[in-house]
């Protein structure tokens, strides 16, 4: 009795593609992880955290620069308020955690364990830590901006970069949930 075996390299390629498509949760978690990292990076690097109307006109600033009209200048490190340093530190560390989460998810397509550590569990941990760090950094920034005396004399509005920072928190939480579900379905 003859057994049916794959007869060509094309059928082996098809099996590999089908195997990848059988993991929609893992693919979704990788896409969501990349999206949350992108949101976080854009938020961190753009100068639209705070918009103020001053005597010199509209001023918009971020964590690294302040802009009056089209002219932007970098903050002097030693003249910067301490809450900006804390916010920067939390968000930069969160960016690294997000990157490691994405890296773990991408590697998990090839293998489940790395040095006896589940890659999806590591990705979940990195996603949750990143969400927590962003939450702390954003809360510090928000509290100081809302309760600081110099900022209450002018009209103050939070900008799009600030909004992207907050939007990355639920994205990281959604990523973690997708990674947990992916881990649970892959272990059965």
Image: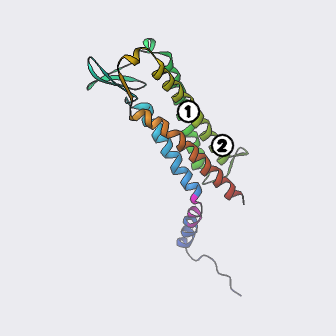
Residue occupying the point 56% across, 51% down: 29
Q: Please determine whether, in this image, residue 20 is positioned above or below residue 178.
A: below
Q: How is the image coloured?
A: rainbow
Determine crowd level at label 1: few under 14, some 14-19, many 20+ residues with C-alpha closer than 10 A: many
Number of numbered labels in the structure image = 2
Q: Which residue is mark 2?
A: 122
Question: Was residue 20 drawn as part of the magenta stretch in this picture?
Answer: yes
Task: Judge by depth and name the residue closer to the eye, 163 or 2.
Answer: 163
Q: Position of residue 133 (x, y in %)?
A: 58, 31
Q: CA distance from mark 2 to mark 1?
A: 20 Å
Question: Was residue 19 drawn as part of the magenta stretch in this picture?
Answer: yes
Residue occupying the point 43% across, 25% down: 63
* Residue located farthest toward the bottom when viewing the structure as drawn: 1
Q: Main secondary structure of the magenta part?
A: helix
Is residue 131 found left or right of 2 in the rendered image?
Answer: left
Q: Earlier in the sequence, mark 2 or mark 1?
A: 2
Q: Position of residue 50 (x, y in %)?
A: 39, 27
Determine crowd level at label 2: few under 14, some 14-19, many 20+ residues with C-alpha closer than 10 A: some
Q: Which residue is mark 1?
A: 135
Is residue 70 found left or right of 46 in the rendered image?
Answer: left
Location of residue 53 by image quarter: top left
Q: Position of residue 94 (x, y in %)?
A: 55, 33
* Residue located farthest toward the top when viewing the structure as drawn: 78
Circle 1 — which element? helix
Q: Position of residue 105 (x, y in %)?
A: 59, 48
In contact (CB < 8 Å): disc 2 and disc 1:
no
Is residue 44 found left or right of 24 in the rendered image?
Answer: left
Residue occupying the point 58% across, 42% down: 101
Which range is magenta?
18-24
Q: Please determine whether, in this image, residue 169 is positioned above or below residue 21.
A: above
- Which numbered marker is on residue 188? none
């Amino acid at each position: 009795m003859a057994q049916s075996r794959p007869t060509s390299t094309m059928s082996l390629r098809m099996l590999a593609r089908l195997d990848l498509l059988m993991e929609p949760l893992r693919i979704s978690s990788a896409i969501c992880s990349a999206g949350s990292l992108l949101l976080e990076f854009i938020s961190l690097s753009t100068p639209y955290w705070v918009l103020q109307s001053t005597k010199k006109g509209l001023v918009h600033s971020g964590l690294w620069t302040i802009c009056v009209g089209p002219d932007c200048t970098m903050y002097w490190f030693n003249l910067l308020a301490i809450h900006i340093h804390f916010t920067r530190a939390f968000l930069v560390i969160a960016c690294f955690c997000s990157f490691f989460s994405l890296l773990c998810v991408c590697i998990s397509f090839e293998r489940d364990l790395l040095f006896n550590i589940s890659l999806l569990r590591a990705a979940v941990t990195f996603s949750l830590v990143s969400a927590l760090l962003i939450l702390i950094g954003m809360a510090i920034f928000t509290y100081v901006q809302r309760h600081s005396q110099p900022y209450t004399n002018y009209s103050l509005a939070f900008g799009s970069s600030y909004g992207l920072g907050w939007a990355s928190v639920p994205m990281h939480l959604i990523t973690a949930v997708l990674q947990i579900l992916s881990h649970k379905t892959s272990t059965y």
